[in-house]
Image (tube, rainbow, N blue to C red):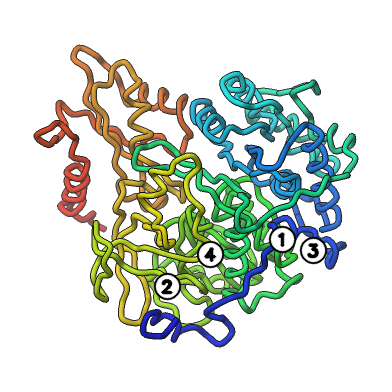
Amino acid sequence: MTIETKPWHKHYPPEIPTSIEYDEYPLHHYLKESAEHYSKKKALYFMGKELNYEEVYEDTKAFASYLQKLGLEKGDRVSIMLPNCPQSVIAYYAILMAGGIVVQTNPLYMERELEYQLKDSEAKMILCLDVLYPKVANVKPATSLEHIIVTGIKDYLPFPKNKIYPFIQRRQYQMLVKPEQSTDTHLWRHLMNESSKQVSPVEIDPKEDLALLQYTGGTTGFPKGVMLTHYNLVANTQMSMKWMYKSEKGQEVVLALLPFFHVYGMTSVMNLSVMMSSKMVILPKFEPEDVLKVIAKQKPTLFPGAPTIYIALLNHPDIKKYDLSSITACLSGSAPLPVEVQERFEQITGGKLVEGYGLTETSPVTHSNFIWSNRISGSIGVPWPDTDSKIFRIDADEEADHGEIGEIVVKGPQVMKGYWKRKEDTDKVLSEDGWFRTGDMGYMNEDGYFYIVDRKKDMIIAGGFNIYPREVEEVLYEHEAVQEAVIIGIPDPYRGETVKAFIVKKPGQVVTEEELDEFCRKNMAAFKVPRIYEFREELPKTAVGKILRRTLVEEEKKKRDNKPLQSS
């Protein structure tokens, strides 16, 4: 741990230690701790409803007890398919308390995506939103699911919103789902009333036992379950606490806008809030005006987010009408943070906005700029405490020189145990001594600050979501009129990147952009659907017939470079 081998340590302010002694408790221990020491402090705010830590803990015990009554055993996987709401927090900690492993499932998934994840994880139970119940029920026969637990947004709304919401929901979704309690379908309100709250203790080894299977994509297009232990998540959360050293336990209000089903929102919002006994102001979806109103009224101090979120707020015509001065710190992730966005947001709020970096496989944060000192715009900052990072020369295990572009590799207590049931994939990226190959290209300067320059893989990041081209291509190939399809990401001023599809039609077949769009929306989550289609007679290929994706990317870049400037 010398300055020579880790030059970033010389920039650490005295308040941040270079090494931390991490707790070896299971993750749900911290909810119990907050309930004991801050029982009457507000834990959650959701659309007018407030719950204190004691209430959240009691509901968590109730749900954990019911899961065990249904037969949940240590190591069983339980899926959560919810937007941000009180139930998503309560269920998360309840599953861990009952000895289960959480499988976070994106509520935007279509049936084919849901079925794949449930089958791969062999989830025994799922908690889903009522409007998603038909989708879950349709795929259940093809999976290991034994029980479906159904909840609704109204379950934690105050009166009279809880009475009005079903009518709003019916208008919004054009449906009113009313599942009934049965041997394999369970209603949240029913089980919370029936539960004994007596949870059988489960022995957890934090360093060995899994807390989470968090699915990510891969170069093959098939999502992989990232195995994160209790210790991985506790360590990364405690690193975050040290990094945000001006924040006080029991005093902060955190804006919970990032989805909990994404590892970034789960760690930097939910786990951090519970560990710090903070109040979470929960929003189920992003609507710029709603966010501005909530900030002005609820006065959050911490606002983790993504560049697209900050951009949308800054571009809202009425932003100056709202008081955003409560915000003291924001950590931005998921995509590069433009310098002008950082500067404008800090000007308006008076708080600090810095860029961080991480991956699902690292729980997720590995690097960040300092919030209150020594930050460099355009850089992802420096490694966190106990986190080592290097630049390896491309396709080699030797370290690159300062300023030389190569692959970023990281090592630390937040690095995953491996990929679920995929030893070969694990061995490709995780060495025996714990170095993880990120697949991202970058460099480190002489001061130890890291910079991202490109992605080794073809992953597209649009609006903070990771999109893998092969996954979209496979859907397109299922259309009867498509002979060949290739997906690339192109720059987008709002989403960061957007999805473009190049299509070669089968001889004699006719298909329109509108028809392909409709087909894609039926078979994949909306954020993956191509926004632009280009039909071609043929696609560039190698001598052995492999489509040259990079050639298409370069063609798009030339088009942008040669585009004439708009006259003002």
From the viewer's perspective, is residue 517 above or below residue 468? above
- Residue 138 sits in which quadrant? top right
Pointer 2 with pointer 4, Cβ within 8 A:
no
Query: As rendered, which of 14 and 258 lies closer to the eye?
Result: 14
On the rendered structure, is 244 left or right of 360?
right
Q: Which residue is mark 1?
A: 274
In this view, the mark in front (3 or 1): 3
Q: Which residue is mark 3?
A: 33
Pointer 3 with pointer 4, Cβ within 8 A:
no
From the viewer's perspective, is residue 267 above or below residue 13? above
x and y, in percent, of residue 485 in the image = 27, 29
- Residue 561 sits in which quadrant? bottom left
Mark toward the start of the polypeptide (3 vs 1): 3
**Residue at the image position 23 percent from the left and 21 percent from the top:** 505
Instruction: State the CA–CA distance, disc 3 to disc 4.
Output: 23 Å
x and y, in percent, of residue 151 in the image = 74, 34
In this view, the mark in front (3 or 2): 3
Instruction: State the CA–CA distance, disc 2 to disc 4.
Output: 19 Å
Q: Secondary structure at mark 1?
A: helix
x and y, in percent, of residue 260 in the image = 61, 49
Amino acid carrying label 3: it is Glu
Q: Secondary structure at mark 4?
A: loop
Mark toward the start of the polypeptide (3 vs 4): 3
Q: Which residue is mark 4?
A: 413
Instruction: State the CA–CA distance, disc 3 to disc 1.
Output: 9 Å
From the viewer's perspective, is residue 330 above or below residue 559? below
Q: In this rendering, does residue 307 appear at all?
A: no
Q: Secondary structure at mark 3?
A: helix
Pointer 3 with pointer 1, Cβ within 8 A:
no
